[in-house]
Each structure stands twice: as C-alpha cells, then as structure tokens.
Amino acid sequence: MRSPEPSFEEAAALASIIPLEQGLFAIHIAPFAAAIESGRALPLPRVQVSRFPSPGLADVDILGEDGLGEPWFGPPGGVAVVRSPPGGGAILVTMLAPPANAPALPGVTVQRLDREVPADGSPAVAAPPASPAPQLPVTPLDVLLHVERLGDCRFGGEGWMGNRGQRLRVEGFTINPLAGLMAEDLEYKAFQPDGAETPWIGAPRFCGSRGRRLPLTGFAIRVSPAVAEQFDVVYSGAFVNGGVTGPLGNGEPCRPALPDDTLEAITIRIVERGPA
C-alpha cells in the first residue's frame, strides 16, 4: 500500500531583521489584515518573532506566555518579550500570507523594559561579542489569587494565572519566589477603584482584599534595590473589558486602558540577568 503523497500549501513570506543592543525589550506586533483564502487548510496570514543567527554573537532569548520559544501571532497582533545578550543580537519578524493576496508586513514597535534610553539619545556601550550563553534562569513562583466567587486560587507561576475571558475579578494576590530570589527581595502593590492603591508590600504577604467585593484595577511588581542589577520582572494584566496591558517591567504600573476596568488574570516572569 502506497503512502499518501504529502500535501503542500504555497505561502508568500515577508521578513524584517531587527538588531537589538544588550537588554530586555517588548516587541509589539501591530494588528494586520486577515485576507484568508477560501478552501485553505492553514489559516494565513500569520506573523512569527524568531531568533536571527548572528555570527560571533549569542542568540537572543524570546519569552512568551508559555516560556521560551518563537511565538506566532494572528491578525490581532501581540507582544513578545526578548532578552538580547551581551554584545547584542537580532530577531527576525516574518509574515506568511496567501501568495495571491499578501498584505504588507505589520508595524513593529520595540520598547525597552529594563532601563531608560540616555537623555542625550546616545546608544549604550555594547560589551564585546560573547560566546553563546546558557539559557537564562527563570525564578519559579507560587502565586495565589483571591478571585470573586472562587476564593483563593493557587497557580504555579507559568502562563496566564486567573480566569481570563470569564469575567471573574481578582481582588488580591500573593507572590512567593521558590528559588533563586529571596522572598524579602520581591515587592508588589495593587491598584483599586477610584484611584486607591496599596503601599508596596513585601513577598509573600497578601496584597489587596478578601470578601469586600473590591476588585483590583492594576498592579506593579519590582525587586529590591539590592538585587535590581541581577533580576528583571516582566508582567502583563488581562482586564475584563479592555483586554491585555503589557508587558511591563520592574515596577511600572500595569493598569487598564479603560478607567476602573477590573483585573481578571496576570502573567509574571522573573528572569535572572546574564553576565554584564
């Protein structure tokens, strides 16, 4: 019995190479047209953020919702978080589209997460090229969310934590690092309706409220100054009406696009920096 012949689908490819200096970046992929041809088995167009091999330089690390990888995005676009190693690196943004109806490559915005650009606009001094580095350690977390109608819910720290899309509001949380980072070196705060906010609270203490029907309208997370040169914190929030805010990092407020919109899920990644 003959094996079935493999089937192939043609696609047009558009790509852009983006060089990055050393650091932590959010790569924002703008929404794009979805001209999907009838009868096509694979949905196109799609956009991927991937590593671009650079001779003499280490590969970048790409952090997605599900860990390290090279994520694909559909027409709504999205965000990838990229850590570029000492000496810099590069990413490749590629669109695959039906060959007869290929849209333009969507807009790509690069946002620095780990520090501000110097006031005079001058670039940072890059370290000399380095040999490929080991995968950067990610701090394991134990996260507890207090969710309306469900009470305390515990999560393992990976991907979206909460009940995204179910309109169940988060009222409080705790974050406890399990390795790599001491609990006393992690701090967080919560934002509440009408402009209220908590003070910075040290891990693993509870932040927010229980049983008061007081949902969160945002949050922020940072490490202490003692370890700020060793770790980056990257996080996003999903809100009931306004969608996702982030990724943000290192103490930046994660707030919704709509006033007093309420939080329903979060992602958190605490990444140990490589050698400078």
Image (cartoon, rainbow, N blue to C red):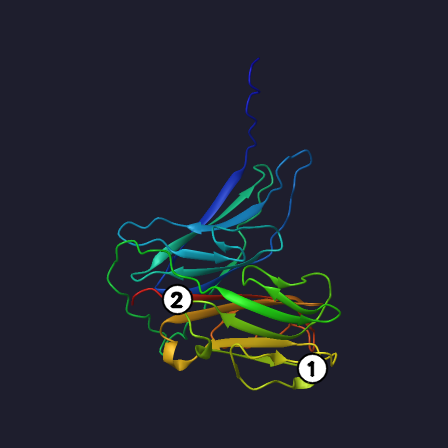
Quadrant for the C terminus, please.
bottom left
Q: Residues within 10 Å of mark 2 (few under 14, many from 20)?
A: many
Above or below, 212 against 163 in this view is: below
* Coordinates of residue 43 in the picture (x, y in percent): 62, 41
Q: Residue at x 67, y 62 (%)?
A: 164
Which amino acid does the dot numbered 2 rest on? Answer: Glu
Mark 1 and mark 2 in contact? Answer it, CB < 8 Å.
Answer: no
Q: Is residue 115 visible?
A: yes
Residue beneath disc 1: 193
Q: In front: 102, or 149?
A: 149
> Observer-nearest residue: 82 or 186?
186
Quarter of the figure with residue 238:
bottom right
> In this rendering, is residue 202 above or below 126?
below
Lower sequence index among marks 1 and 2 = 1
Q: Quadrant of the N terminus?
A: top right
Indicate which disc residue 38 carries: none
Q: Nearer the viewer, mark 1 or mark 2?
A: 2
Q: Which residue is mark 2?
A: 272
Query: On screen, 91 above or below 251?
Result: above
Spatial separation of the CA atoms under disc 1 and disc 2 = 33 Å
Question: 30 or 237: which is nearer to us?
Answer: 237
Residue 216 lies, in percent from the top left, at 66, 76
